[in-house]
Image (cartoon, rainbow, N blue to C red):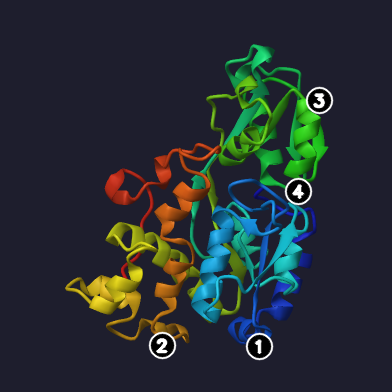
Amino acid sequence: MKKIAILGAMTVAGLSAGVASAATLDDVKARGKLNCGVTTGLVGFAAPNANGEWEGFDVGVCRAVAAAVLGDPTAVEFVPTTGKTRFTALASGEIDLLARNTTWTFSRDVDLGFEFVGINYYDGQGFMVPKDLGVSSAKELDGATVCIQTGTTTELNLADFFRANNISYEPVPIETNAEAQPLYLEGACDVYTTDASGLAATRAAFENPGDHVVLPEIISKEPLGPLVRHGDNQWGDIARWTLNALIAAEELGVTSANVAEMAASAGNNPEINRLLGTEGTLGEMLGLDAEWAKRAIMSGGNYGELFEKNIGENTPIGLARGLNAQWTEGGLLYSPPFR
């Protein structure tokens, strides 16, 4: 779910260069909606609900950007993308923002001509197996068949891990998480590997989640986050600081429930005042109005609210904050200052 497209790097980079000079903010305003690339369906992160409305942790980032720019969190066209198609969609201008649990790597940032605007989930690659397989460690998977998404860095991590441990495997190529689920459940592969968060989301969708275990090994670093094309710094700044606004809001105690009151009262905390636009000119610096961050926070809540509502411990996904806790709580989550 994160990963290098099988297109040649020069093809993607060339597409990106062709549209990079466009002012994305002007395009989004003229269109009246944000075109946001998401996964084809991963419950908790991005998936249509029973009414066909997209919801999830990554969807919340898309809606926050739309609220900041257009004043309407529903003004989003969600474009489903696979591991193979996501980078072409962004490079060609089909989408304005890719918010699809995508790993920040050197080559994607530099060679493919994209700009990661931050990290919204610190993750790592893991393995899920049926409990009745009787396996307690990934090092016991010699000879296993492994469902693996093509066009991803997961493939490379998997090969490295098995080679380093001198064990073999047989890959079962799949393109989407939806394709992987029935194959894995039917026994076409012994193992499913992807980001640990993706494994938790996939297992939660099973009829009997308790029949499957996520093995203890985490074999990679997968810093996941939204990205835009190189060459449009203003748009990159808007996406970056919208994400930072959600992160800072949690640290500062600004929530979807109290943000309007805190903005109206303009209290004694200067950073909150700058964040909410009651002091300073940060919105103007972005080419937006003063209340851009206020609207982003109101759209679905601060970072913590988005996390707990969509993927937290009280949801079927059941993810603990872990590394994604605020820096003040022992995690890695940290926004640069709003000043």
Q: Secondary structure at mark 3?
A: loop
Would you call the spot at circle 1 few (<14 residues within 10 Å), some (14-19), or many (20 or more)?
Answer: few
Label 4 to label 3: alpha-carbon separation: 23 Å
Q: Residue at x 28, y 61 (%)?
A: 252
Residue, x 54% and y 27% (percent of image)?
217
- Mark 3 surroundings: few (<14), some (14-19) or many (≥20) residues within 10 A: few
Q: Give yes or no for contact between labels 4 and 3 (Cβ–Cβ under 8 Å).
A: no
Badge 4 element: loop
Q: Number of marks in the image?
A: 4
Residue with the mark numbered 3: 186
The residue lying toward the viewer, choosing from 84 and 283, is 283
- The residue positioned 60% from the left and 56% from the top of the image is 55
Disc 2 residue crowd, few under 14, some 14–19, many 20+, Cα 10 Å? few
Q: Determine which residue is flagged by label 4.
A: 151
- The label on residue 284 is 2
Q: Residue beneath label 1, please?
A: 30
Q: CA distance from mark 4 to mark 1?
A: 34 Å
Check if mark 2's residue and mark 1's residue have beta carbons within 8 Å: no
Above or below residue 220? Residue 303 is: below
